[in-house]
Image: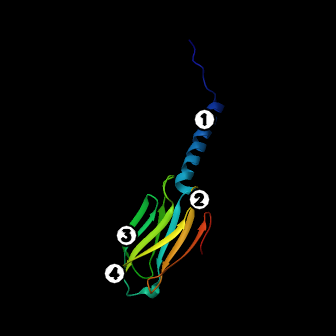
């Protein structure tokens, strides 16, 4: 019995299909649902202690022990599709625990946020829907 052979066009079509599938699957991880957060401690906060920082968006969390005045930290969070997509931020400023509730992020929407801690420990923020910049 003779086996049917696939021609070069069939292999190319299959390769293209695999490439498109990988590209579309990658959009979930790298595109639509990512929450890109930049945390800035203003240089004017020199001598103040900012510690125990936590970012939460649904089941996605990121924590770090401290951040010096003038420093910036970039974090990408990827909340799950069934998660509550409210952004929460907590930190200690000179030993006092503080909390900030960020925007609720619609599913299928990527967000960029900039959180700034000023010299008195207060938070201000700017945000936009991706693709965007906050410069």
Tag 3 near tag 4, CB within 8 Å: no
**Precedes in sequence: disc 2 or disc 1:** 1
Where does residue 87 sit, x and y in percent of width and height?
49, 66
Tell me which label, 2 or 4, sits earlier in the chain: 4
Distance from Cα at disc 2 to Cα at disc 1:
31 Å
Disc 3 or disc 2, which is closer to the eye? Answer: 2
In three-dimensional space, the C-alpha distance between marks 4 and 1, rounded to whole angstroms, equals 59 Å
The residue indicated by pointer 4 is 95
Q: Whole-Å distance between the Cαs marked 3 and 4?
A: 15 Å
Q: Nearer the viewer, residue 114 or 82?
A: 82
Q: Position of residue 109 (x, y in %)?
A: 59, 59
Q: Nearer the viewer, residue 105 or 34?
A: 105
Q: Are marks 4 and 1 in contact (CB under 8 Å)?
A: no
Dot 4 or dot 1, earlier in sequence? 1
- Residue 80's x, y, as percent? 48, 54
Which of the two discs, 3 and 4, labels the residue nearer the N terminus?
Answer: 3
**Badge 2: few (under 14), some or many (20 or more) residues near its Cα, within 10 Å?**
some
Mark 3 or mark 1, earlier in chain: 1
Q: CA distance from mark 3 to mark 1?
A: 45 Å
**Closer to the camera, 75 or 15?**
75
Residue drawn at x 53%, y 59% is 34
Please identify, in this view, whether the residue under mark 3 or under mark 1 is nearer the observer: 3
Say which residue label 3 marks.
Answer: 64
Q: List the residue tagged with mark 1.
A: 14
For label 4, the SS is loop
**Marks 2/4: CA distance?**
35 Å
Local SS, label 3: strand
Quadrant where the image shows the C terminus: bottom right
Mark 2 lies on a secondary structure that is loop
Mark pair 3, 2: CA separation: 26 Å
Residue 47, above or below 24? below
Identify the residue at image location x=63%, y=31%: 10
């Amino acid at each position: 019995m003779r086996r049917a052979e696939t021609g070069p066009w069939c292999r190319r079509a299959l390769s293209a299909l695999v490439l498109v599938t990988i590209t579309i699957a990658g959009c979930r991880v790298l595109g639509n649902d990512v929450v890109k957060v930049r945390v800035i401690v203003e240089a004017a906060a020199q001598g103040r202690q900012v510690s125990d920082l936590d970012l939460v968006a649904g089941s996605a969390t990121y924590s770090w022990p401290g951040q010096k005045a003038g420093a910036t930290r970039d974090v990408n969070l990827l909340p799950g599709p069934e998660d509550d997509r409210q952004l929460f931020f907590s930190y200690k400023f000179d030993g006092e625990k503080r909390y900030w509730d960020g925007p609720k992020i619609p599913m299928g929407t990527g967000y960029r946020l900039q959180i700034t801690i000023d010299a008195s420990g207060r938070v201000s923020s700017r945000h936009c829907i991706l693709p965007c910049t906050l410069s």
